[in-house]
Amino acid sequence: MLAVARARGATAAQVRVAWTLQQGPHVLAIPGTGNPDHLAQNVAAGALRLSDDEMARLSSPDQEDPVSRRLPG
């Protein structure tokens, strides 16, 4: 996750939102935030188009996901 984010000049959270959105038209990502900076990052993530290779790397079961690791639940 971090390697793709660094290569794209994005945050790990933006890559995670982009990956989620690219799962297909049946998937809806609804990131919530009360922080205007995070809102801008979430909107920018919607325009981030990951390559097929990046999607495969991020879908790997051994892929570390620092964003999910911090999320409650």
Image (cartoon, rainbow, N blue to C red):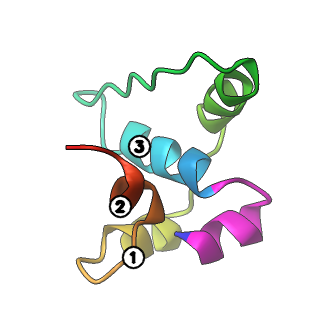
Q: Secondary structure at mark 2?
A: helix
Picture quadrant where residue 72 is located? top left
- Residue in view at x 73 percent, y 18 percent: 36
- Residue in view at x 19 percent, y 43 percent: 73
User: What's the distance in space between the residues labelled 1 and 2, CA to CA?
Assistant: 9 Å
Q: Secondary structure at mark 1?
A: loop
Residue 66 location (% of width, % of height): 46, 65
Q: Amino acid at mark 1?
A: Glu
The residue identified by callout 2 is 69
Q: Main secondary structure of the magenta part?
A: helix
Q: Which residues are magenta?
A: 2-11
* Residue 28 is one of the magenta-drawn residues: no
Q: Amino acid at mark 2?
A: Arg
Q: Is residue 44 left or right of residue 68?
A: right
Q: Earlier in the sequence, mark 1 or mark 2?
A: 1
Q: Earlier in the sequence, mark 3 or mark 1?
A: 3
Residue 59 location (% of width, % of height): 32, 68
Are discs 1 and 2 less than 8 Å apart at CB?
A: yes
Sort mark 3 into few (<14), some (14-19) or many (20+) by Cα contacts within 10 Å.
some
Residue 57 location (% of width, % of height): 42, 76
